[in-house]
Image (cartoon, helix red, strand yellow):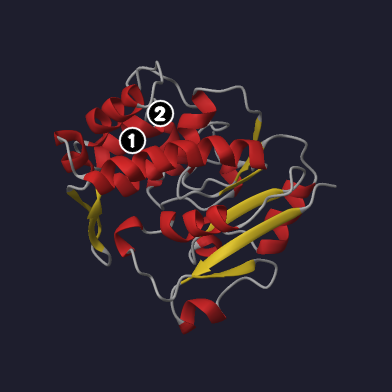
Amino acid sequence: MTPVKIHQIHYDEASRLAVDPQFIALDNSDNPRPDWREYWPIRQFLLSHTLDENTYYGFVSPKFGAKTGLSGAQAIAFAAASDRDVVIFSPFVEQASFFLNVFEHGESNHPGLLPAMQQFVEQAGLQIDLARVVCDHSRSIFSNYFVAKPAFWREWFRLGEALFTLCESQASPLAQAMVERAQYHQASGEVGIKVFIMERLASLVLVTSKFSSLAYDPFALTRTGIAASYLDEDM
């Protein structure tokens, strides 16, 4: 069995009290950089901790249980039995299925994401056409709901820091495009395109590397509730 350490980010007392008892609380109550959403506390953790090479690490939002329908115990048990580099807990199966890949999905929901991310990956030295790559469920990750071993996190963090440095400089038209505001949903208002790009870095690593992955049955996880996301039991 592989050791699994899943950290659940909390932002206030209410979200701290709601941390799944099987997860490790990750305090971001000060929230000094809300513009980066979950990347900021994940970044602070990776900069300040030495990871065990044989352990799975994950960093999930307060909404993990509501979005996936999984308890911490279920997620940890599934990951612990795996021998892959990455284990995915990505909900909303129809969102992954209706589009060629998570990048096309991002462009559909946040116009301007795809060309900005394409420029970013080229600047990062990756030779890939994001508009043409195919993502099946073993490479489609939403909301950063995955656990991975340190080798994967190092590559993820390399790209994350490249994105962070680019956006913080605000020294180019691409940097300006990254910080452009995009609608998230009514309750949360608008956030920068960079956040939605950051949430697709895990999929980017999977389609540009040889890391192995295993996805929790996406049909067993929460869906968005539209009729097309459910199988007709009579068929």
Q: Secondary structure at mark 1?
A: helix
Spatial CA span between label 1 and label 2 = 6 Å
- Residue at image x 29%, y 45%? 194
Q: Measuring from the top left, give residue 142's x and y in whole percent.
A: 46, 45
- Residue at image x 45%, y 30%? 204
Front position in the image: 156 or 169: 169
- Residue at image x 65%, y 51%? 57
Q: Amino acid at mark 1?
A: His
Front position in the image: 235 or 219: 219
- Residue at image x 49%, y 61%? 61
With respect to residue 53, does 5 lie above or below? Answer: below
Q: Is residue 179 left or right of residue 232?
A: left
Residue 80, numbered label: none
Q: Measuring from the top left, give residue 159's x and y in whole percent.
A: 44, 36
Q: Locate the C terminus and report the quarter of the image it occupies.
A: top right
Can the viewer see residue 215? no
Q: Measuring from the top left, give residue 50's x and y in whole percent.
A: 67, 52
Q: Mark 1 sits on what residue?
A: 105
Q: Mark 2 sits on what residue?
A: 101
Front position in the image: 52 or 223: 52
Mark 2 Cα shell of 10 Å, populated few (<14), some (14-19), many (≥20): many
Q: Is residue 30 left or right of residue 44?
A: left
Do tag 1 and tag 2 residues touch (Cβ < 8 Å)?
yes
Q: Amino acid at mark 2?
A: Asn
With respect to residue 50, does 213 lie above or below? Answer: above
Q: Is residue 220 left or right of residue 167?
A: right
Q: Secondary structure at mark 2?
A: loop
Front position in the image: 115 or 218: 115
Mark 1 Cα shell of 10 Å, populated few (<14), some (14-19), many (≥20): some
